[in-house]
Image: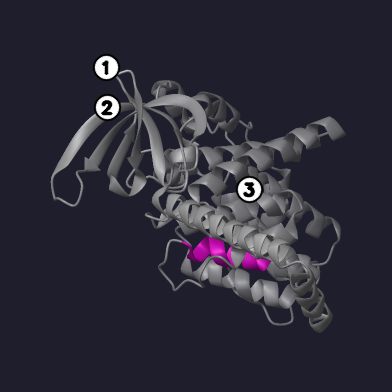
Amino acid sequence: MMTQAYRSVRGDRIANPISAVARSRCAIRTRTLAALAAAVCGALHAQTPAAAPRPVNLPPIKARLLIREGNKDATINREVVLLGHTSQALLAQATRGESESFQVDKARVLRCEFAFDYDRAALAAAVRDYDWAAAVRTLAPSLRVALPYLDLADNNGLDLAMDLGMYMVLSADRERRMASDDASRERALKQYEAAYDVFRDAGRADWSPLAPVAILKGCRALLAQGKDEAAATNLKRVEKPAPGDPTYGHYWLVQGELLRRGGKTREALDAIVQSIVFADKDAETFPSALLLSADCYTALGEHYRARDVYYEVAVLFTGTDWATDARIGLQAIMDGKKTLEAEKSPIENVFFHVTEDMNKLAEDLLKARAEPKTTVGAPKAAASANF
């Protein structure tokens, strides 16, 4: 085809030399102009920087930033109103004087102190009384505006976000436990979803060791919604912890729950024991891990051990939702009459070395009048340290 085209052009040139020369000059001129245009465009493109991503506009929140100046060791404190952000920069405005907004590189921010406005006395009272719904109502409106900025180094919002997420989970737990219709259950699911959103934002604070803890707490919120696959995916983001790591109790509790739901009860129990034995001082995981272990013992037919664990939770965490769940489990064990026969090989309680007649102790506990449910969720002894 190329040969035919070449011959055709050559024949035209021979037949009409003037026309052929004109066409050739025109083609050369066109190619030259195109090359020049391409060169000019290339130069302009090379000199024009790519447009910076536009900040996401957010509700304003006052903050004090400690900012590093350039590459120097010098720092400045600046009071600003945060208006939005990108992945790399903050959009801010001075609190006084200047009215123009400006951007601050996030990497230059060494500390951020938000000016939170919430009723601290009301929050303290709600936590003291384990009124988690009231705690959420008190803290959420002020804190929610700061959630998109939790990736800022050394900010004072992360701890409060962890608290808020836990208050939401505990409130949802109670809503679900008391739910008598679909509307109530749906409200509980919405609260778990909101808690997950808070923990997801907290999990972006990679400057803090609390970030992986937030991811794991988010996994528990997902499990409460029945989103097992999403929880399993997020669990893979956290490295397997060593004893003493802040993630230890949460990691093995999530792992145990996933295994239990997957029908691997014995493996689930092994995982839960890791949480119980090495994180027995963590009030956010210890009672939940005990209850899950009792559920596993029941599923495995180890009713004596399940009875003992349910009893200990009911006694240790009196007046809490954990105690309520334990009493329900204990009642089911006793109603099933699975522990009436004497144990062939009596097993001392794995935690407290109880050697009394456990059937009698369990019956006395169930017959006793339950305390008024004025507290929900966590034992008073641990409340100040963990919530």
- Distance from disc 1 to disc 3, alpha carbons, whole Å, reads 51 Å
Left or right for 301, reference 319? right
Q: Pinpoint residue 219: horizontal percent, then vertical percent.
A: 62, 56
Write down the quadrant of residue 350 in the picture: bottom right
- Residue 64: x and y, percent? 28, 31
Q: Which mark's residue is nearer the viewer, 1 or 3?
A: 1
For the N terminus, the quadrant is bottom right
Nearer to us in this view, 387 or 231? 231
Q: Main secondary structure of the magenta part?
A: helix
Query: Which element is circle 1 on?
Result: loop
CB-based contact (under 8 Å), mark 2 and mark 1: yes
- Which residue corresponds to mark 2? 79
Q: Tell me the tag on residue 322.
A: 3
Image disc number at residue 96: 1
One can see residue 309 in this view: no
Q: Amino acid at mark 2?
A: Glu
Q: Amino acid at mark 3?
A: Trp
Seen from the viewer's position, the closer of residues 73 and 274 is: 73
**Residue 32 in the image, given as x and y percentages of width and height:** 54, 60
Marks 2 and 1 sit apart, C-alpha to C-alpha, by: 9 Å
Q: Residue at x 64, y 61 (%)?
A: 27
* Relative to 111, residue 134 above or below: above
